[in-house]
Amino acid sequence: MGFPRIARQGKAAGDPPGPFDQGGRRLRIVVDVAPDHRRLEEWNGNTYAPLNMPDPEIFLWSLTEGESIDRYWIGTADDPADAGRVVIPPGPLDPSAHDYLGFSTIEGQGRWTERAIWPYSTYETFAQEDAGAHAGLSAEQWLAELLVARASNEMRADLLATINPRLLSSQAAYVTETNPLSAVQAVGVVGLYLRSKGQYPVVGPERLVLDERSMFLLAVEELLPSWRVWASELSRHTYATDNDTPALLAQSVRERIIRMLRCRDQLLIASMASQTNTTMDRLVESLDYFLVNLVGAFDAAARAAHLVYDLPKDKTRTAGWQNEKWLKKLRNADLEDLFAPDSTGYRLFEICRFLRNTVHGEGLPAIALNESRVAHTQTFVRLPRNEADVLVDHFDQLGGQDAWGLRRFGDGLGDYIDAATFVERLIPSAMGVLDEAIKNTPTSRLTGIGQFTIEPPVDHARDSPGTRARVMFLLGLPKT
């Protein structure tokens, strides 16, 4: 599904820039979850014990407890008058209300703010017209649900985190413009926002906090499940032979994926910000470095395979998954099939290489586009002209043009991609192929492997299945 995109809300008078802009305001989020999930996670502070698997809604509530986020929540008049409570009264309107439905919010320190949804009659009409699209749903119930979305919009919230399946699936503009997200999706946006502020919590603000590198290290092993054994065996070969090349190749794959994830963060932050020449430059620069590091990880894995199969050292530069002659020398049917012409692995790696290779030539030009169907300016990156048709064919074969963020403008303008959509589609697919390449490289045949046993990861709060699940939620990435 990719990283959730949140449409930027229009600025109110005196409102500072958005949460992903430099010097911007705090992230505003409205949380619409069950009352028993509006609570902090239970954790006793014991870092020697593993963390529980997170409940996405409770995890979201805990993450948004800090002062760097303005959190509101949908409640009732019977709920405690705590900071952030939003109470939307049921209709019908009083005849003197002039088509305004008033609702209240508590801003903190007991300060109440009265707001209004207008024009109420319009949303009554929408509810009557659209309720039939949902089996067994009355117009009154749909009106109550869509008023939650409209209240979020009136508050200029950046997103609405909800468990309501109808709001999440609705294609109606009066719902989608409020950015309704599931709790899992919302955690991804909150995680990106917190990382943009240098914050890396995995339980809640100021409770259990990692740093960027620790978080990305855990992500590497979730994206590449085969890396741990593969890297351990290469490192043991280094110990047995007193040759540090195998261990350095394993480290290179890890470090390049870490850098790739760092570049991804910068790209997503730039795409979420108000689009200017500065954010455009940052986005394209991040995409450049992202591609260089991703292809570098594949290349390091190929050189490791060259070493495993004891091919001539003076031919190391020929090692590459795109090199059919080199692949045949491995005599590994699984690896040959993985990168056979027109296979998924071949197409994905060619996408990576063609775009990476623009660093040697015309680069990746970008344009800003303001379309009527989108309320804000977007940045698109042009595909290299000589390879554009091949890349478009690969996109068609690997899920379709929309899934990859492709836009074909025609009339000599060229073919463009939405960089954020592109990298979110590419990461899980490319990591799956790279993991297969690592898994099918028989490092166990190397000298010195039988002298050691591979120990599983230490199970404690900073590295446990629960910790890793939280990290992947925060990164908005699926486990391979």
Image (cartoon, rainbow, N blue to C red):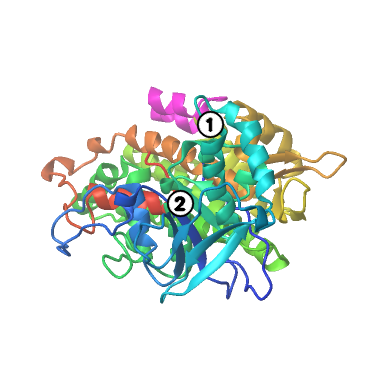
Residue beneath the point at 30% across and 57% down: 39
- Is residue 390 in view from this perspective? yes
Residue beneath the point at 25% across and 49% down: 466
Quarter of the image for residue 172 reads top right
Q: Is residue 213 left or right of residue 12?
A: left
Q: Position of residue 125 (x, y in %)?
A: 67, 38
Look at label 2 and name its amino acid. Ala
Q: Which residue is mark 1?
A: 138
Look at label 1 and name its amino acid. Ser
- Seen from the viewer's position, the closer of residues 51 and 182 is 182
- Seen from the viewer's position, the closer of residues 161 and 466 is 161
Q: Is residue 109 left or right of residue 236?
A: right
Q: Which residue is mark 2?
A: 186
Residue beneath the point at 63% across and 73% down: 15
As helix, strand or loop, the secondary structure at mark 2 comes to helix
Please state the extent of the stretch shown in magenta in the rendering. 325-344
Q: Position of residue 75 (x, y in %)?
A: 41, 55
Circle 2 residues within 10 Å: few <14, some 14–19, many ≥20:
many
Which SS does the magenta portion mostly show? helix
As helix, strand or loop, the secondary structure at mark 1 comes to loop
Circle 1 residues within 10 Å: few <14, some 14–19, many ≥20:
some
- Is residue 246 in view from this perspective? no
